[in-house]
Amino acid sequence: MSPIHPNAVEGAPRSNIVYETIKTKIMMGEIEAHSPLTEEGLAEEYQVSRTPVREALRKLEQDGLVEMIPRKGAYVKGLTLMDIEEIFTVREALEGISAKIATELLSDYNISVIESALTDADRNLDDRNSETVFAKGNEIHNVILKVAGNGRVLSIVSNLQVHIQRLHMLSSSIPGRLKRSSEEHWLILQAIKQRDGELAEKRMREHIRSTKESLILAFKNNFYRA
């Protein structure tokens, strides 16, 4: 039995609790792609009725993380090589130009926030704390997108965010990927400090392309199930 700790999400509707719990497990790879998700099994596991489970699965389907197959039920939706190509092609274009724009707009405070986050990420590399490294390293992307201030770009990236996070979680499990990403993040920050927008865009594009290539190689080598 895996009951949900009530203090973790005090006051939240049961369906939201179940939704967040399953979503996190899918994102972290704890529930593999193509795994069945039965209402009865999940209700028993999380000690809730089937109604909040049904609502949670509906939300996960809207997120694109779960697929409802007629007469078969709910399954964790897999990722394909085409998914990776499409998502990272969009990211490379949008985040590349955002890095160029943000380079002229980032304040000294913004830069110090990024630098502090990247330093924290590096401290956790030796401890192999992949969740913290990922979260801290991702701060450079968050700050750049926010400061660049293009509402349409933010909207598009926001719509892809669940899939981006899922792919990042998968990439963090690839040997050496976190360290390489950290090095690439520092190179982007170096270009920003030099106020060289062209170089910042180039390095952001290279970083996103590098992550994409690592994921594609991992998929082709069956490093994890798609």
Image (spheres, rainbow, N blue to C red):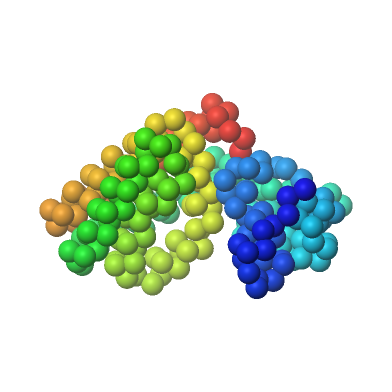
User: On the picture, is 198 further left or further right than 15?
Assistant: left
Q: Residue furthest left?
A: 194
The one nearer the camera, 133 or 106, is 133
The quarter of the picture where the C terminus appears is top right
The one nearer the camera, 179 or 154, is 179
Q: How many marks?
A: 0
Whether residue 157 is visible here, answered yes or no, is: yes
User: On the picture, is 47 further left or further right than 203?
Assistant: right
**As drawn, 183 above or below 75:** above
For the point 38% across and 72% down, which residue is it?
A: 151
For the point 82% across and 53% down, which residue is it?
A: 44
Q: Residue furthest front?
A: 7
Q: Residue furthest top?
A: 221
For the point 45% across and 61% down, which residue is it?
A: 157
Whether residue 198 is visible here, answered yes or no, is: no
For the point 28% across and 47% down, which residue is it?
A: 119
User: On the picture, is 57 further left or further right than 207?
Assistant: right
Query: How far from the left and from the top, in percent, is residue 184?
Result: 29, 42
Q: Place residue 55 in its image quadrant.
A: bottom right
The one nearer the camera, 2 or 25, is 2
Q: Place residue 225 in its image quadrant.
A: top right
Query: How far from the left and from the top, in percent, is residue 39?
Result: 82, 55
The one nearer the camera, 4 or 182, is 4
Query: How far from the left and from the top, in percent, is residue 135?
Result: 42, 52
